[in-house]
Amino acid sequence: MIRIGKNQKPNDLVERIEELSEQSIYSCYQCGTCSSGCPFVQTMDIHPHMVLRHLMFGMNEAVLKSKTIWLCVACFACAERCPRDIDMARIMESLRQEHLRENVDHVNLGHMSAELLESVPQIALVSHFRKNTG
């Protein structure tokens, strides 16, 4: 674990994420295995291993505003391959929960046309709301 000096302030978000996910963020040594096994890494703006690096360096806002935490489908490919046994899917879920606690709504059905709502499978809408409401 990284030691915090006298003039450094602990990263509160990291502490909350570690408590929620029961994972140690500072255990990651940035091998990139989680990112290399992720099926959605091409669509992510911050690769999974870099999410942890951002958190380590206190770049919390960049992580919480990224689309990466919403694109993780919890397939557990990252957790299966991690040499440090870090469950990235649990960390991503914890980040989503922290973001949702800020009461920011990402989905506004009022902006979707009636035709689009009729064409989207109902299970997709239900799944989305379940994922984004914890």
Image (tube, rainbow, N blue to C red):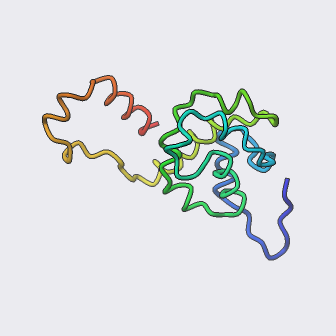
Vertical arrangement, residue 103 with respect to residue 86, above or below: below
Vertical arrangement, residue 62 with respect to residue 96, above or below: below
Q: Is residue 108 left or right of residue 89?
A: left
Q: Is residue 64 left or right of residue 12?
A: left
Q: Position of residue 78 (x, y in %)?
A: 67, 33
Q: Nearer the viewer, residue 62 or 81?
A: 81
Q: Quadrant of residue 88?
A: top right
Q: Position of residue 114 (x, y in %)?
A: 13, 36
Residue at (68% x, 51% y) in the render: 52
Vertical arrangement, residue 104 with respect to residue 59, above or below: above
Residue at (67% x, 63% y) in the render: 58
Residue at (62% x, 63% y) in the render: 59
Q: Position of residue 74 (x, y in %)?
A: 56, 31
Q: Position of residue 123 (x, y in %)?
A: 33, 23
Q: So how many labels did they put on this image? A: 0
Q: Is residue 96 visible?
A: no
Q: Nearer the viewer, residue 127 or 51?
A: 51
